[in-house]
Image (cartoon, grey):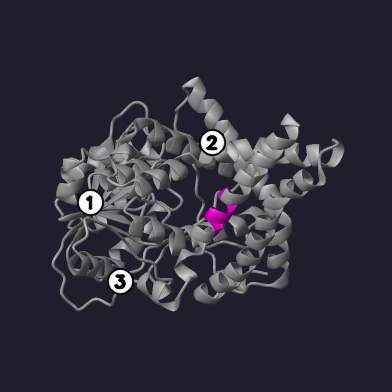
Amino acid sequence: MLISVSVAAISLALFWMAAFTLWWQMHAWRTPETLAATRFESPDGQQGLSFSLLLPARHEQLVLEHTIDRLLESRHRDYEIIVIVGHDDPGTAEVAERAAARDPGRVRVVVDTHEAKNKPKALNTALPHCRGDVVGVFDAEDQVHPELLAHVDHAFGATGADVVQGGVQLINFHSSWYSLRNCLEYFFWFRSRLHLHAAKGFIPLGGNTVFVRTDVLREAGGWDQNCLAEDCDLGVRLSSVGKKVVVAYDADMVTREETPGSLMSLLKQRTRWNQGFLQVYRKKDWKQLPTLGQRMLARYTLMTPFMQAFTGVIIPLNIAIALFLDVPIGVAVITFLPLLTAMVTFVFEIVGLHDFGRQYGLRVRLVHYLKLIVGGPFYQVLLAGAAIRAVWREQRGRNEWELTSHVGAHLVREGAAR
């Protein structure tokens, strides 16, 4: 009897968790008005802000030059690019110094001398050198639209925001079965989910294409150099003190990136993000949020790694109990409720993949839809494994930075993919 009650209670909890997550993913598509409100407004031609664009780069000599060249194509009149390189990374430093020599008025190089390197340490190293009104962060492999800064400038002026979060989109959906799911995950997160967080007043910021007023960032003390999800942490701290965050997403304006090049690289990346969320949860800055609803949303969001780790273990166990043990028929039916939300999620993902291809002019074929469906359970196993690994690393006190390498797979013409 106790086993039956426990199985039913856990299954109902998993069902409602999945239902809430799906509803939040659908936020941007609930009404045409909601969808329209997620986009940037067209600039009015007035450019009142200056930008310091931070570009931390570690062992990124394969992609850094292209990223700097794209940033230099910006049509905004007042910006600087600060490339942060490690003192022990001569290959990347050579590329950065070459770019600075070509355009010394726009590009500067700052050297990070920390013995143990990570992204927040690099960003904090560059913060005192920033001259602009707004600090923007990009990754070394980013493909940035020339009009983005003009749109961000207008967004600050039109909304009075302290922070503007732009869209980021993985593009190389054809590279592998998991790349397709990874691209779609970003599409739902930046296209929809982050807009819900901004509307609720609690937002874990994205790692790049994020712009913060320089005085606000310095007042906050920059980034937490001991956190593996420094972007999430900054968003939580700024949300907790009432700073206004605006999120905008346009397919034309998104920063394009590539997916991790291997399953192990993806596993390590997700482990780092999950462990960073756990660190932010333990810091308890989110408890300063003024309303119960905000605090509940924060707790749920930041505890996602725990829940993914838990579901990765408990769902197979529940199904086995329902199939092989003598439990009441009602309990057995309840046990399979999470599968119902999984089926609805699959349908939503299929529609989302079609919308993704349409918005980006990409050729989505039948084989891609089949990969999306067949790969779904395996991708969830990978995410659960990353969450379990993150919980284990956090409990063991292991917080070294596992770097994700880039090769520029998103720079290939996707429409030519077969």
Name the residue tied to disc 2: 306
Q: Quadrant of the C terminus?
A: bottom right
Asked if residue 204 can be seen in this view, the reply is: no
Compared to 115, does 367 lie above or below? below
What kind of residue is marked 3?
Answer: Glu
- Which of the marked residues, 3 or 2, is nearer the chain's N terminus? 3
Place of residue 187 in the rendered image (x, y in percent of width and height, measured from the top left): 50, 62
| In-image side of 4 versus 285 (left or right) | right
Highlighted range, magenta: 17-22
| In-image side of 305 versus 316 (left or right) | left
* Residue at 24%, 67% in the rendered image: 155
* Residue at 21%, 38% in the rendered image: 221
Cα distance between the residues tagged 1 and 3: 26 Å
- Which of the marked residues, 1 or 2, is nearer the chain's N terminus? 1
**Dot 2: few (<14), some (14–19), or many (≥20) neighbours within 10 Å?**
many
Name the residue tied to disc 1: 243
Name the residue tied to disc 3: 147
- Which of the marked residues, 1 or 3, is nearer the chain's N terminus? 3
The answer to which quarter of the image holds residue 90 is top left
Closer to viewer: mark 1 or mark 3:
1
